[in-house]
Amino acid sequence: MGPCHYVKAIPRSIVVGVLLAAALFVTMAFTEEAASAQELVVGATSLVSSLDPREVRNQAEAFLRAQLYEPLFRVNSAFSLEPVLAESWEMQNDALVVKLRKDVKFHNGAEFTAEDVQYSSQRYAERQKLNIEAVEIIDQYTVRFSFKDKQGMMLLSTARVYVLCKKCTEAQGDEELKWRPPIGTGPYVYHNHVIGLSVRLTRASSHWRRRIAEANVDRIVLNSIPAVTTLVRSLQSNEVHMALGVGADDLPPAWLIPSPFGEVAVIPQKVYYSGDDPSMATVRIKQ
């Protein structure tokens, strides 16, 4: 049996906001207690070694990046791109012109502008070898991307960039970002961490996405639990509400049911799935 590819939902809302930006293909598990918990406890088999959004190497770091930062675009569960910090976009002679949202603030209250997009994109392109040649600022809320490979997936390159506050990062020191308090626009704000053990986040006091502002989870605690068997036991005992890195192969056969989309892992009051579909995080969960 392989990783889970579909979800069978529990009958109550789980978390509004937490799942909106979860990385694709990250296998997770939930207990029903997460539906009403003000603190969501997440267990991960991988260790967090950095909070820098361009240094993501595993599922735990991808999950944290999705809570702390936001991209211009993201790939949804239908494998199509949808805007996040971008408001609109158009291609102009092999260049991509993006209009930015004007109602976005960073966690420290600083305004999100084209300067932050240019800085973050160039920073990513240096390390991640993206298909981005240059980012030109047209005005405070408009940028133009030019690309190295005109035949490549140009829009997808911009979706890989999670935006940092330029002035904040430069003030902290770019190379010291690994464990410095990160300043992004995501739904959750860095609180503290214990290296190799846990990271704590708190819900942003305000956010441009209304459904995130109404989230029923005020705090997220991500604990590193490398042993899968220990993580599964923690789910059963409700010590953790959600797990990263648990696949169908790690679960007892009795927990699994077949589906046209692959194996579905279901146990009483628990759900296992892979994907990023905002509708899964609402009361109107697919049955």
Image (tube, rainbow, N blue to C red):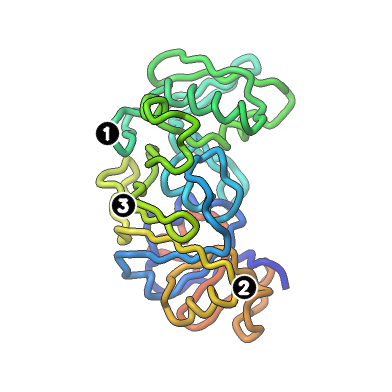
From what the image shows, is residue 38 above or below residue 67?
below
Residue 287 visible in image: no
Alpha carbons under labels 3 and 2: distance apart: 31 Å
Name the quadrant containing residue 36: bottom left
**Number of numbered discs on residues:** 3
From what the image shows, is residue 220 above or below residue 138?
below
Name the quadrant containing residue 123: top right
Other-residue count near label 1 (Cα within 10 Å), few / some / many at <14 / 14–19 / ≥20: few
Q: Nearer the viewer, residue 40 or 141?
A: 40
Q: Earlier in the sequence, mark 3 or mark 1?
A: 1
Percent across and percent down for residue 76 are 56, 48
Callout 2: helix, strand or loop?
Answer: strand
Disc on res. 203: 3
Residue 65 visible in image: yes
Callout 3: helix, strand or loop?
Answer: strand
Amino acid type at circle 2 is: Val
At 52% across and 67% down in the image, what residue appears? 225
From what the image shows, is residue 88 above or below residue 207?
above
Percent across and percent down for residue 141 are 40, 21
Amino acid type at circle 1 is: Gly
Q: Which residue is mark 1?
A: 109
Q: Which residue is mark 2?
A: 264
Q: Nearer the viewer, residue 99 or 117?
A: 117
